[in-house]
Amino acid sequence: MARSRSILRLARRPAWMLLAAAGAAWSAAPSSPSAAQADTARPRAGLDEPRAFDLPPGPLSAALSQVASDAGVLFSVDLRLIGDRRQPGLRGRLTAREALRQLLRDSGLALVQDGAVLTLRPDATPTGSTEHAPPPPVTLPEVRIRSSAGGDDTYRTPSAQQATRTETPLLELPQSVSVLSRDFIRDQAPQSMADLLRYAPGLGAAQGEGNRDTPVFRGTPSTSDFLLDGLRDDVQYYRDVYNIEQVEVLRGPNAMAVGHGAVGGLINRITKQPRWRDEDELTLETGRWRHGRVTLDADHLLAPTLAARLNLMTEDSGGYRDGFHLRRDGVNPVLAWRPAAATLLTVGYEHFQDRRTADRGIPAWQGRPVDVDPARFFGNPDVSTTWIRLNALTAQLDAELQPGLSLQHKFRLADYDKFFQNAFPGSVRPNASTGALEVALVAHNSRMRRQNVFHQTDLTWTRQLAGIEHRFLAGVEIGHQQGDNRRETGYFATTPESTSLWVPLTDSVSRVPLSFRRRATDPDNASEVHVVAAYWQDQLRLSPRWQATVGLRHDRIRVDVDDHQLGQRLRSQDRLWSPRIGLLHQPTAALSIYANYSLGYALRAGDQLNVLSPGTQSLSPERFQNWEGGVKWAPSTGLDLSAALYQLDRQNVAVADPSAPTQALLLVDGQRTRGLELGAAGRVGAGWQVMAAYTLQRSRVRASLSPLAPAGATMPHVPRHNLSIWSRWTLTPQWSAGLGVQARSSQFTSTDDTVRLPGHARLDAALYYAPAPAWRWQLNVENLLDRRYYAFAHSNNNITPGSPLGVRLGLQLKF
C-alpha cells in the first residue's frame, strides 16, 4: 500500500509523469523489500551488460522506457522534455547505456545518472538560444522499473497512432485496438493480409471474388477500409507486407479519426522508415507448390542529417488450386532528411504490381460445399486473371514548433490500375436426363482506374489548463479521388447470346471460347469525389485515475458519377458531423476500464465511391453507431491483455417499399452485431511469446432488406466463435519453435442462410534456427495435420477450400 500511495502522489503532479511502462512494471515487481534493495544496488550491471536490441521506429518515450525496463534500472523524467519526439528505431548488440544514448541522438536531450537513478537534461544549446529552453531536470521519488525475463523479440507494441491520430499507449485508448508487430509478421511470414489478420479479435475474412482483400469487421465486410501510414488506400486489391513495419487494427467505427467509411473498423499499415544506421537484410523463401520469394531491406545512413531505406520484393509462386499462378513485385525507396533536431521530412515512392489467377472457389449443393478435391478448379483458369499496378508518392513533415507543440503534414498521391476477369461457378442442379449433378459457369470482367490525392495536417498541443493535462489535436483533411469503372459480361461460343454454360460437376473446367462485351446492366461510369474535413480532439487527464477523449469532425463530401449507361450525371452531397466520446478509469497503473461511443458513415456511392442511382443520390448515408466497454491489463511490462463488449447498429439502410417496390425506398435499421472480444499479445514468461484472439459474436438482420435478406437472418461470414492462438518458445539461444491453432464454428455464406460452412480447427507450426546473429533459418508449416476445411466464401457458390499441408522454408541474411 505504501508503494501504491507513492505512485499516486507522483501521478497527482499534473506536469510530471513517469514513462508509460513504469506503472505496469511496478505491478510485476517483487514485494520483498530485500529484493527491491538488491535490484537497486546494482543499476550499473544492467546498464553495461551487452544485449541485442531490435526496436521499431516510434515514440521516443516508449523506447526509452522499454530499454530502461529491460535493463532493470530506475528512470524518471519530465515528459515535457520529450514531448512528441520520435526515434528512428534501434537494432544491434549494445549495452543499455549505449542504446539510450543512440535513441537520444539528435533529440537535444542528454542522459544523466544521479546515483541509482537515470534522468534527462537538455543538451548544450548555442549561446543565446534560450528562448524556449526546457526546464531543468528533476529527479522524481524512487520508483523501480524491473526488467522481465525472456528473449529480445516481442509481439507486444505498447502504443498506436491512428485511433486518436496521436501516439497513445494502448492502455490509455478507450477503444478496441490491436497492433501486429514486426516480429510477429516476420515469424508468421504471411502469404496474405487474411493470414495475418486472423490473429486480431473481432475480424473475419470473406473471399473477395478472388481479386481483393475483404476483411469482415464485427459482422461488416469491407473492401476499402485500409490506410497506409494514416492515409486512404481504399482500392480493391491484394496487399503485401514486404515494406510493412507493423499493422494497426481498429475495431468499431471511428469517423472522427478517419472520416467516412471504416464503419466496422479499419486496418492501418505502417511502412518501414529509415532508421539512421547501416544494415541490409536479404530474405529468400521457397516452398511447396513452387513457392519462390525474395525480399531486400536496405537501410543506410547517407549523412548525419540524411538517411534512406529501400525495400524490394519479387515473388513467383504456384498454389494448391489447379492452374493457380501468382507473380508480384514491389519497390519502395524512402528518403529521410533532418534539417534540424526538431524537424524531419520523409519522402517515399512505391511501385507495386500483382498478377494472379482469379479463383472463386467451388459451389455448394444442398446447403454445403460440394465434396470435391480442394485442388479442383471450377471455370477456366486460362481466362481467369486479376492484376493491379500501383504507383504512389508520399511525403510527411514532422516539426516540433516549440516544447509541447508539434505539426505534422502528410501527403499521398496514388495511381491505381486494376483489372479482373473470371469464369466461375454458379448454381448446381441435377441434369434433367441423367440426374447427374451439373454446375453453371458464368463470366465477366472489370477494369478500374483511380487516382487518389490526400493532404492531412495535424497540430498537436500538450498543455496544462486549470489543473488538467490536455493533449489537443486540431486538423484538416483535403482529398480528391477520380476514377473510371467499366464491366463486361462473358458470352460462351456454344450459343452466341448465352451468358452461362452448364458442365458436369465431375468435369468442372471448360475451355469453351469466351467473348466479353457490355450489356445494358453492366456499369460504365466515371466518378469524382471531393472531401474537405476539419476535426478537433482533446485527450484529458482529469485526475491520476480518470482520462477522457472527446472529439468532433465535420466532413463536406461531394460525389459525382457520370453514368454512361443512363446518359446522366448523378450527384450526392453530404455534410457529416462525427462525435467521439471515450472515458477511461485506471484503478492501477497497469489496469484500465473504458467506455466509448462513436459513429461511422457509409456513403451511398458504395465502398468504391462509384455507384449512385436516381433513387439513392439524395439519401443521407448509412449510419453505424457503436457502443463499447472494455478492460485492458498489463500484468507485466511485456504482456497486454484486453477484453471488450460491444454493440454495433447499422441504421438508415435503403430498402424497397413493399407497397411500391419499384417507385419508393424506405430507410430502416438494418443490422445489429453484439459481441465479446478477448486479446493477448506479448511475453508470457521467459522466452515465451503469445498472440491470441477470441471472438464471440452474433450479427443479425433487424428489418427485412430484401427477399434474400429477411428480418432475423444471420449475417454471412460471422461465426459464433472464432479463436486464434500463436505461441513461440525460445528453446536455446539458437533455436525457437512456434505452434498455433485456428478454430471457428460454422458460418453462413449469404443472408439467405441456406449454405453453411462447417466449423473447423487447424494447427500450424514453425521452427527457427539462428546459428549466428547475421543469419536465421525459418520453417513454417501450415495445416500441420492436413485437415480438410473451408477458409471463407463470397457467396453460396463461391467458396474457397482451405489449404492442405503447406511448407515454406526461409533464410534471412543480415549484412
Image (cartoon, rainbow, N blue to C red):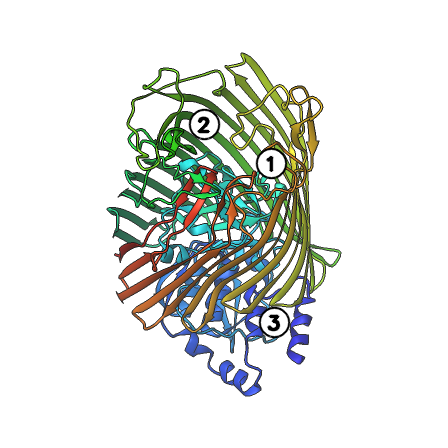
For disc 3, the marked residue is 140
Q: Quadrant of the C terminus?
A: bottom left
Image depth: mark 1 or mark 2 in front: 1
Between the residue at mark 2 and the residue at mark 3, the CA separation in whole angstroms equals 55 Å
Between the residue at mark 3 and the residue at mark 1, the CA separation in whole angstroms equals 62 Å
Pointer 1 with pointer 2, Cβ within 8 A: no
**Residue 52 image offset from top left, x and y in percent:** 36, 67
Q: Tell me if residue 148 can be seen.
A: yes
For disc 2, the marked residue is 450
The amino acid type found where label 2 is placed reads: Arg
Question: At x 46% / y 46%, what residue is drawn?
Answer: 269
Asked which secondary structure carries label 1, the reply is: loop
The amino acid type found where label 1 is placed reads: Ala
The foreground one among 365 and 423 is 365
Task: Answer with mark 3 or mark 1, whichever residue precedes in sequence.
Answer: 3
Image depth: mark 3 or mark 1 in front: 1
Asked which secondary structure carries label 2, the reply is: strand
**Residue 537 image offset from top left, x and y in percent:** 66, 46
Q: Is residue 667 left or right of residue 239?
A: right
Residue farthest toward the top in the current orientation of the protein: 567
Q: Is residue 36 left or right of residue 338?
A: right
Task: Answer with mark 2 or mark 3, whichever residue precedes in sequence.
Answer: 3
Q: Quadrant of the N terminus?
A: bottom right
**Residue 682 image offset from top left, x and y in percent:** 47, 64
For disc 1, the marked residue is 709
Residue farthest toward the bottom in the current orientation of the protein: 34
